[in-house]
Amino acid sequence: MTLRHALAATVLFAGLFQAVSPAAGDRCPPTRPDAEGPFYRPSAPVRESTGSGLVIEGTVRTAGSCAPVAGARVEWWQAGPSGQYDDDHRGARVTGSDGRFRIETDVPPPYQGRPPHVHFKVFAAGHRTLTTQVYPEAGRTTVPIDFVLTAD
């Protein structure tokens, strides 16, 4: 590869990175909704942990601008190690000014033919409520994810 080709590739790569970087002001697509399921109960207790072994962390953002959403309520619920939903595996966090959240929970088991998953419902003033699920890959102990909400 010549120096000119290497330079052109570097410029192209930098341009592509800038084109997909939220910091570059590109549109953040909304997070895809997923089934709430029959086990959601409102008003989950605010807590940091519902177990150990899996950390799910990220930022709540606004679609389009990618701006962080302060004060968003992130609720989660899941089946515990026994494969049953229970109050010990539901909780909520409220994002700070940076829109960040972090939870720690037990690794969800597969049950009734479903893959391991954690349900989430995200509420924020001026935004549509998001209901979705996170499907951790086997063996992962950390799942980075941003929840991107649509403004009302």
Image (cartoon, helix red, strand yellow):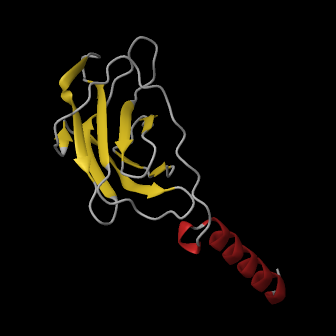
Percent from the top left, x then y, of residue 60?
A: 40, 54
Query: In the image, what residue occupies the spot 36% across and 51% down?
Result: 125
Position of 30 relative to 12 (above/below):
above
Left or right relative to 144: residue 33? right
Q: Quadrant of residue 59?
A: bottom left
Residue under the image location 44 percent in, 57 percent down: 61
Rendering coords of residue 111 (x, y %): 38, 15
Residue occupying the far top of the picture: 112
Give percent across and percent down for residue 80: 25, 23
Residue nearest the viewer, comparing 104 with 2: 104
Q: Residue at x 83, y 88 (%)?
A: 4
Across and down, in percent, residue 65 comes to: 54, 64
Which residue occupies the foreground of this view, 131 or 150?
150
Q: Quadrant of residue 122?
A: top left
Location of the N terminus by quadrant is bottom right
Q: Residue furthest bottom?
A: 3
Mark count: 0
Can you tell which quarter of the image residue 90 is in? top left
Q: Is residue 17 above or below residue 110?
A: below
Q: Is residue 25 above or below residue 127?
A: below
Residue at the (29%, 30%) spot, across then down: 77
Q: Is residue 92 above or below residue 88?
A: below
